[in-house]
Amino acid sequence: MFGMLQFCFPAIRLYAVRSPDYCFDMKPDESYIKLQKRLLKLIEINDRSGERTKIKKQLEKKFMAAWQFTPERGRRGSKLAAAIRLFKTEAENIVRGFDHCTHYTGENDQRIIVTQPYGVFPAEIVQDLTLSKDVCPEVIDATEWAFYYPEHARLFIVKFPSDFQKAMQKFEKELHRAKIDKFIKTQGPKSDYCDVGEMA
């Protein structure tokens, strides 16, 4: 197995405010912010005219252009997200923070998942998906760009290394093998016994 998990960040702490480790300087322009405010108002009055969906799509399109993302190819991001939902950490916990997800392709065909959760920190996502000291996603806190529920849900851009899904499968197999080995060791040597057939 990979031994004890070695995280990408030597001492991960969770902060109530945004940690600069995960922040990015690119900010939305005034037209984007106006659309966010319009969307927020429609959500608050529970508008069902279809205008909410229209504005969300406009925001997402602007977001994709600003961050130079393209639509996912071959549902690769969707398949990775599905695998993450089934993945269990070394402590047998599910991965935190993947809610209201959209999937994109980034530079060099990189798989991108954008998640817009409530009450989750970037460090928690990194912690849950660190498979070894060299294999973990990059998480960018881009909450200013939220287009699901601005001012309430956060927005994290999660960029995955190539073959991350295969690495997760390997991690789970080796973790399972390590648990079996540990169980066998805790049983100790088998007690001596007499075979009744041998005694006859």
Image (tube, rainbow, N blue to C red):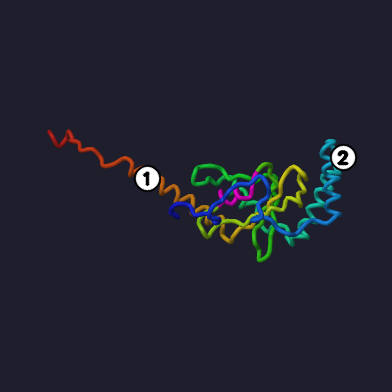
Q: Work out whether residue 198 can be spotted.
A: yes
According to the image, label 1 marks what residue?
A: 182
State left or right for residue 35 relative to residue 138: right
Q: CA distance from mark 1 to mark 2?
A: 58 Å
Of residues 17 and 197, the one drawn nearer to the viewer in this rendering: 17
According to the image, label 2 marks what residue?
A: 49
State left or right for residue 157 relative to residue 8: right
State left or right for residue 111 relative to residue 8: right
Of residues 47 and 134, the one drawn nearer to the viewer in this rendering: 134
Q: Residue at x 82, y 37 (%)?
A: 44
Q: How many marks?
A: 2
- SS under mark 1: helix
Tell me: residue 133, above or below residue 123: below
Provide the residue span drawn in magenta.
120-129
- SS under mark 2: loop
Tell me: residue 24, above or below residue 99: below
Query: Was residue 182 drawn as part of the magenta stretch in this picture?
Result: no
Give x and y (percent) for residue 72: 69, 57
Q: Residue furthest bottom?
A: 108
Give x and y (percent) for residue 99: 67, 44
Give x and y (percent) for residue 7: 52, 54
Q: Residue at x 77, y 44 (%)?
A: 151
